[in-house]
């Protein structure tokens, strides 16, 4: 997605949102964003809500009728390149995903490699209003595969989730999924915030399916590692120490001499396409039917599917929309 493509799409979304708000006699306030689950007909966040659950409470489309979805409209926008990110700036503060001299973590980079360390933050994070904490994920280090210039350090804060104070921009804690990544396993995938029972104790959890093939459960109040389990076949990690640091298989990271065929590959086990969390089942989904994983419906767009679907309602009719290639498609049940 080119910059023009992205800006145009954002403008259209904001225009429609503003029009709806004007008709409602209201504006998009912080309170509406915080309580967006009360307005399931609207989709006001990239991940659906501040908690990143990517779940729609709309009930018109069900597993019993989803096979009847029909295309309602599509719009093709110009552009061919993929937009990523620029530094995170909110109000008066800025936080750098790659720490400079004198900042915590700078010593995890060899020499001045931090200047070219990449670590893009190219998707939105999640927010806990009660804890007043932003949770933001960070991309892979640069150079992407050649680790020789950046050394054998952890290369903070790449491939991490960072908890930030939104009032000051200060880091509260961080957790790194893949230290010294030589695989291009960025961690910009969704972090889902849920409050639920965990092994007999009510806890505030952060759920994350990482590109390195591991599903993580963290305590989001302090970043404590609670669990890490593979959700695809992987052969690079022998487990975790008590802090959640992976015990990497010797020879699995990139090197001039080469390594064995590592799973997952450079494409990763997942990507930025959104998972979902079902508050009714309490399950984390990367798939289809909420109970069985069965495929219920499909539509051939013939485009590169690099986006996530969303659902909204207009005049009591539910729609599902998704971008594929350079086109946005919108579906609904037949009238």
Image: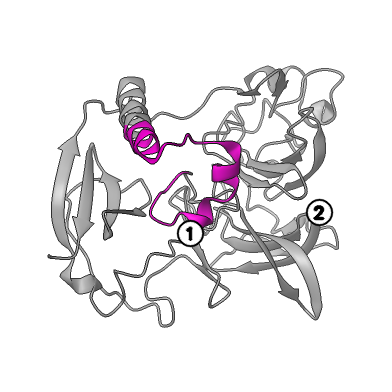
Q: Which residue is mark 1?
A: 275
What's drawn in magenta, residue-wise? 16-44
Viewer-proximal residue among 123 and 264: 123
Left-right relation of 89 to 99:
left
Please report the residue visible at 48 percent of the width from the left and 56 percent of the height from the top.
54
Which residue reaches farthest front? 25
**Does the image show residue 186?**
no
Q: Secondary structure at mark 1?
A: loop
Residue plotted at (75% across, 74% down): 198
Q: Is residue 26 magenta?
A: yes
Q: Is residue 145 left or right of residue 135?
A: left
Above or below 190: residue 198: below
Whole-number angstrom distance, CA of label 2 to CA of label 1? 22 Å
User: Is residue 53 or residue 304 the one in the foreground?
Assistant: 53
Image point 35% across, 28% down: which residue?
6
- Residue 158 x/y as whole percent: 66, 37
Q: Residue at x 75, y 43 (%)?
A: 132
Query: In this picture, is 305 found above or below 141?
Result: below
Q: Is residue 134 above or below residue 201?
A: above
Asked if residue 146 lies in the magenta stretch, the reply is no
Q: Residues within 10 Å of mark 2 (few under 14, many from 20)?
A: some
Q: Secondary structure at mark 2?
A: loop
Residue that mark 2 sits on: 221
Q: Earlier in the sequence, mark 2 or mark 1?
A: 2
Q: Which mark is residue 99?
A: none
């Amino acid at each position: 997605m080119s910059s023009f493509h992205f800006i145009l799409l954002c403008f259209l979304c904001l225009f429609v949102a503003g029009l709806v708000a004007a008709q409602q006699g209201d504006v998009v306030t912080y309170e509406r964003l915080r309580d967006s689950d009360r307005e399931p007909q609207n989709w006001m966040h990239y991940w659906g809500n501040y908690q990143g659950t990517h779940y729609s409470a709309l009930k018109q489309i069900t597993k019993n009728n989803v096979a009847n979805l029909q295309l309602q409209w599509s719009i093709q926008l110009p552009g061919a390149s993929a937009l990523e990110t620029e530094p995170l700036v909110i109000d008066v503060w800025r936080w750098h995903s790659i720490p400079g001299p004198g900042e915590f973590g700078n010593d995890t980079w060899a020499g001045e490699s931090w200047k070219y360390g990449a670590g893009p933050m190219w998707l939105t994070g999640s927010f806990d209003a009660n804890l007043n904490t932003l949770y933001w994920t960070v991309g892979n280090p640069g150079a992407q595969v050649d680790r020789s210039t950046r050394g054998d350090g952890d290369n903070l804060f790449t491939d991490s989730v960072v908890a930030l104070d939104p009032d000051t921009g200060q880091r509260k804690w961080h957790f790194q999924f893949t230290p010294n990544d030589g695989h291009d396993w960025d961690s910009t995938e969704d972090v889902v915030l849920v409050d639920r029972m965990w092994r007999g104790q009510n806890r505030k959890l952060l759920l994350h399916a990482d590109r390195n093939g591991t599903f993580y459960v963290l305590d989001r109040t302090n970043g404590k590692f609670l669990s890490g389990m593979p959700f695809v076949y992987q052969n690079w990690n022998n487990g975790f120490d008590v802090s959640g640091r992976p015990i990497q298989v010797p020879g699995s990271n990139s090197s001039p001499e080469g390594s064995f065929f590592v799973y997952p590959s450079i494409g990763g086990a997942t990507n930025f396409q959104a998972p979902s969390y079902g508050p009714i089942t309490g399950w984390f989904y990367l798939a289809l039917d909420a109970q069985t994983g069965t495929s219920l419906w499909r539509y051939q767009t013939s485009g590169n599917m690099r986006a996530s679907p969303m659902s909204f309602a207009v005049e009591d009719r539910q729609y599902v929309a998704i971008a594929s290639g350079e086109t946005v498609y919108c579906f609904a049940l037949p009238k």
